[in-house]
Amino acid sequence: MSTSISLNVKWGKEIFDTTFDPSISVSQLKSILSEKTGVPADRMKLMPKSKGLWKGLLKDDFNLSSIDYGKIKPPVQILLMGSAAKLTGPKVKTVFIEDLPEEEAAKVAPEPSGLINLGNTCYLNSVVQCLRVIPELRSGLNYVASNNNGQGGASRMLVSTLRDLYQDLDRTTKPVQPNLFVMATKGAFPQFAQTAANGAPMQQDAEEFYSGLLNFAAQETRGTNAIQAGLKDAQEKDLIGADNLIDALFGIQMEETYTCDELEGSATTEEKEGEGKMELDTNTVSEAAVVRHDLHRKLVCNIQGGSDASSQTNVTHIMEGIELSLNGKVEKRSEVLGRDAIWTRQQRISRLPPILAVQFGRFFWKETPDSQDHSGVKCKVMKPVAFNGTLDIYDFCTEKIQKVMKKARDAALAEEEDRITKKLKGEDEKSESTDAAAGEKMDIDNEEDEDLKAALAMSMNDGQEEKEEEDVVIGPGLPKNFEGRYELFAVVTHKGRDADGGHYMGWVKAESQKHSSGDARTISDNDADNDDWFVFDDDEVSPCDTESVLKLKGGGDWHMSYLNFYRAKK
């Protein structure tokens, strides 16, 4: 009867004990050790540690019973070499989106959720999706809803249900039915509850809904706490009359100047012989320009050709349309003439918002005196008006605002030129030029004292001007050293030739421009054109790119821009 032999096995840093029957084969011994270590038998190498065993590597045909185990001090010690073949699982467990809870899946879903159309509510769905990506607005809505004391009418209901709707959209990957918000909207705006002869809800204007929504939201976000809930770094001096979060976010303060055309140039000047100077004729009359300040929540792109019906200007770009809307002719009373006269109106922006909305004047009312009811008809302008991913409003601002932004632009330009110079010349040449400049400065200090005094006086004046520029407030919540450029992040479009029908959709810039491959998709040499977008066709959401968005300029039966939303570019 065979006896078991105690075996001590050293495997790497591990040591374990087992037993084996000397009558078994080497293959059987390896099988026993494979169960203990996971090392496959064909990859296992055994070497002796105790004296009196085999020499070198243990061969498969070796007879283990030929060993005199009585002469070996127990336990028998051997050395095992080989790596385990057992597969280990991944360090991070793979979890599929389908297996996640609905709220967790919504956070990592590749596409945001849409809104179900409850009967011609595409005007509402498109605007809601565009405003959804404004974090400052979301924070303000959360503050108002969380501080709801149970009081408030239609405006409080509208704001609270909008906040709840956004939370529902964030919690799911499935389309959401905006039932409560649509009910609150129709309660706040009775005209949106109109129905056709067949009882179906009538199509409404997206811009009218947008403006009405902001009006009610402004009522509910009054006060410093509500403003700072959305714009945490906003200072009271930056608000310039804005007493609510909506005006702080979207408000555009306009400086409107009126000059009387019929008195313009009527003041004559005559040159006195031999004196070489001009004097104003005391018999001439003039009327001082009228300057007013007003707060708007959007700019208008006039695409009909001007502010008066007789204008034939052809507008092909958003900049031309905005310029036309800010200038025009009006008829108002002149106190000097004692009658109505023609005045020139010019508007310039005196305070900038973090969020800038631009409405394209696509719809207008056309009188129909020859019709039976003489009521007129609402028409749509189909002409193409192009726009870019960046909107530069420098030319539309007052001179004070322009001076502040020009300083930031000059600094950015100098920084860019310096960066390019360093890249082209290298640090060595830079050091030489710095030393040379220092030497020239010493020569000036020693030889041109008078010029230095003059320069010092000029610098003091410049310093005073800089201080005055620092006192000029250009708007709340704007990036430091703002240069007056805004980037497009959302568009509301309208499709169809009927102004009272058609279909609205929302186009929103994605928060991340990373694809599943991890690389940003490039469609243009311009970084602003390399971003991904989502198009919201009610409950259907699909990806698109900036190139597709910039084609929404109109001129055909496809979707064309109606409301553009921009944010201050950093």
Image (cartoon, helix red, strand yellow):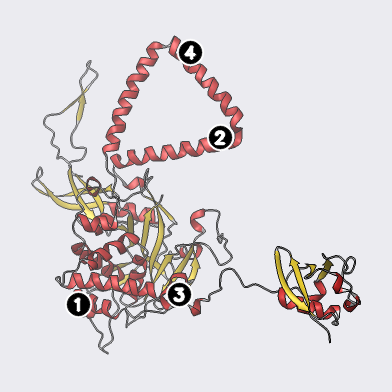
Q: What mark, if any, has residue 187 been given in the picture?
A: 1
Residue under the point 89% across and 69% down: 54
Circle 3: residue type:
Ala
* Residue 538: x %, y % from top left: 39, 77
User: Where 387 falls versus 72 (above or below)?
Assistant: above
Return the residue at label 3: 105
Packing grade of label 4 (10 A; few <14, some 14-19, many >=20) is few
Camera-nearest residue between 28 and 232: 28
Circle 4: residue type:
Asp
Q: How many dots with numbers? A: 4
Q: How far is the residue under mark 2 from the one under mark 3?
A: 49 Å
Return the residue at label 2: 421
Give the mark nearest the N terminus, 3 or 1: 3
Residue under the point 87% across and 77% down: 64
Can you tell which of label 4 and label 3 is closer to the viewer? Answer: 3
Give the mark nearest the N terminus, 4 or 3: 3
* Residue 177: x %, y % from top left: 34, 81
User: Where 61 falls versus 444 (above or below)?
Assistant: below
Q: What mark, if any, has residue 84 been given in the picture?
A: none
